[in-house]
Amino acid sequence: MLNATYEPLTALPLRRAVVLVMCGKAEVVHGDPGGLSLHAATFSLPVPSVIRLSNYVRVPYRAQVPLTRAGLMHRDRYRCAYCGGRADTIDHVIPRSRGGAHSWQNCVACCAKCNHRKADRLLSELGWHLRVVPTAPHGPHWRLLVHSGDADPLWRPYLGVAA
């Protein structure tokens, strides 16, 4: 969903998009590439892929991107911060039991094997090191990453340079 100024706001379910278009609160900017349409008794509507709100919605400024599992996995590209394998869990670099924070700088994507081996120990105790230093992401496009796994490749032109 785009704001009235074509700024990306969020990804939303098809049902919600159709309701916004039907109520006149949004317009279809880009339809389904397959050409599918939704049919009712009195009208036909192309399945929306990208919609734009009719009225501008003010987005409150957020200094920090909220820490979510999906966002963290996307930041680390689904790779374990220790061995580089496929990540399926989240690990705190400095364990919470030792005063580590639940923050972007202390959380990394991790495979189950490394997470189990590390347990509640520090990296220096194991002789391990991080492949990449974790940092907090920035930019408005991070709001859309909750749905990045099922994102349509045709959305790229609407997401801006950072995505």
Image (tube, rainbow, N blue to C red):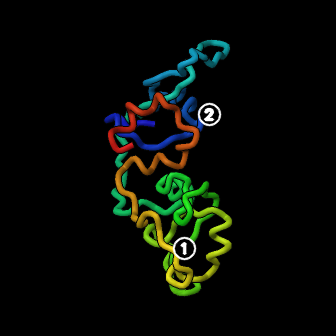
Q: Residue at x 47, y 69 (%)?
A: 130
Q: Is residue 136 above or below residue 121?
A: above
Q: Residue at x 37, y 49 (%)?
A: 140
Q: Are marks 2 and 1 in contact (CB under 8 Å)?
A: no
Q: Quadrant of residue 55?
A: top left
Q: Percent position (x, y) of residue 85?
A: 59, 56
Q: Is residue 124 above or below residue 24?
A: below
Q: Percent position (x, y) of residue 148?
A: 52, 43
**Which residue in the rendered view is the most extreme toward the front?**
127
Q: Amino acid at mark 2?
A: Arg
Residue highlighted by disc 1: 92
Give the Cα distance between marks 2 and 1. 37 Å
Residue 100 or 22: which is nearer the viewer? 100
Q: Residue at x 65, y 16 (%)?
A: 39
Q: Is residue 85 above or below residue 144?
A: below
Q: Amino acid at mark 1?
A: His
